[in-house]
Amino acid sequence: MVTGGSRGIGRAICLRLAGSGVRVAINYVANRQAAEETQRLIADDGGTGALYQADVGSLEETDAMFSRIESELGAVDLLVTNAGIARSGDNLAMDPGIWRETIQVNLHGTFHCVWRAKDKMLEREYGRIVCVSSLLGLKTNTISAERLIAYGTSKAAIIGFVRYCAAAFGPHVRVNGVAPGYIDTDMTADVSDEAREMLINATPLKRIGEVQEIAELVNFLLSDKSSFTTGRTHVAAGGMGI
Ligand SMILES: NC(=O)c1ccc[n+]([C@@H]2O[C@H](COP(=O)([O-])OP(=O)(O)OC[C@H]3O[C@@H](n4cnc5c(N)ncnc54)[C@H](OP(=O)(O)O)[C@@H]3O)[C@@H](O)[C@H]2O)c1
C-alpha cells in the first residue's frame, strides 16, 4: 500500500513495486485522474493496482480505507507512507493553519497508516514499512528556514517515529525511512531557476534527483535484500548535506 501514489515519488514507487509482482493499493486524496494514470501505467506493464481515495490526515478515512483494502486485497504486507504536502509560510509569524495542516498530513498521516497496519503485521509476523521523510528533516535549510519550519519539523519527527517503531515492532516487522533530496516533481515545480541553480551547485552529483531513484531505494528497503536494516532513515540526495 502506497500513500500518495497518484503522482511524483509515490507513483514511481507504485510502478516499481508492481514491476516486481506486488499487488499495489494506490492511495490518493483529490487527484483521481492522476491516480487512474498510475493504475493504467501499472496495467500496461502487466501489473495490478487498485485505487483507494482517503485523506491520510483523517484517522476515520484512513481506518475505512484499510478496511476496504483488507477485504478486497488482504492484509497489508508492505506499507509506504509517502503522502505529503509542502505549504509555505512566508515569515516567522507563520500561519498556524499551515503548521496544523502540514503536521496533520505529513506526521499524523504517517502515524494513522502505520498504526492501522501494524497489528496485522505483528499478528502475522511479517511486515515491511517505509516512511518517506526528507533531507530537510535531517539538515536545516538555513536560507529559507522561516518558510520551512512546519515542513522540516514534520519530516524530522518522522525520522524519530521510524526509530521508535522499529524498536517496538521487531523482530518480524522492519521499519525504515527514506530522506530524498531535491527531486523533480509537482512539489518542487515552483522553485525558481535561481534557487534551482543554487541547489544543483550544492549537490556533489550536480543534478536534481529523479523519482525512479527514490523508488529503487524504497523497493530495496521493502525487499529481503535489506534484511538486517531497520530503524534507519536512508538519504538519497546526490550528496547534498554531507
Ligand atoms: N520532491 C521532492 O524534492 C521531495 C524531497 C524530499 C521529500 N519529499 C517527500 O516525498 C513525498 C512525495 O513528494 P512528491 O514530490 O512526489 O509530491 P507531489 O508530487 O506533490 O505528490 C504528493 C502526493 O501526496 C498525495 N497527498 C497529499 N496530501 C494527501 C493526503 N492528505 N492524503 C493522501 N494523499 C495525499 C497527493 O495526492 P493527490 O494527487 O490526490 O493530490 C500526491 O499523490 C512527500 O512526503 C514529500 O514530502 C519530496
Image (spheres, helix red, strand yellow):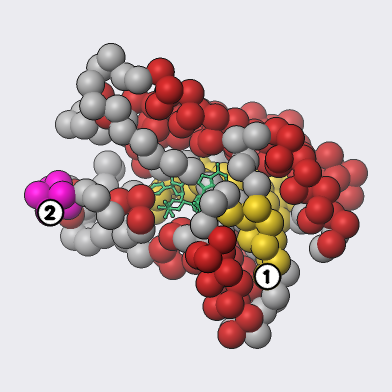
Q: Crowding near pointer 2: few (<14 within 10 Å), some, many (20+)?
A: few
Q: Is residue 123 left or right of residue 25?
A: right
Q: Is residue 76 left or right of residue 56?
A: right
Q: Is residue 172 left or right of residue 84?
A: right
| Part of the protein shown in magenta | 192-198
Q: Is mark 1 within 8 Å of ligand 1?
A: no
Q: Position of residue 102 (x, y in %)?
A: 46, 31
Label 1 secondary element: strand
Residue type highlighted by circle 2? Asp
Look at the image and say whether residue 162 sits in the magenta stretch: no
Residue 199: where, in percent of width, then height?
A: 19, 49
Front in this rendered view, residue 5 or 60: 60
Q: Amino acid at mark 1?
A: Gly
Residue 5 in sight here = yes
Check disc 2 and report the residue beneath it: 193
Residue 133: image location, x then y, percent: 47, 41
> Residue sitting at 66 percent across and 79 percent down?
47
Residue 63 in the image: x percent, y percent?
Answer: 77, 40
Q: Residue 215: in sight, yes or no? A: no
Camera-nearest residue between 239 and 4: 4
**Alpha carbon distance from label 1 to label 2:** 36 Å
Sequence order check: which comes first, mark 1 or mark 2?
1
Q: Which residue is mark 1?
A: 49
| Element on which disc 2 rests | helix
Above or below residue 77? Residue 103 is above
Viewer-nearest residue: 152 or 229: 152
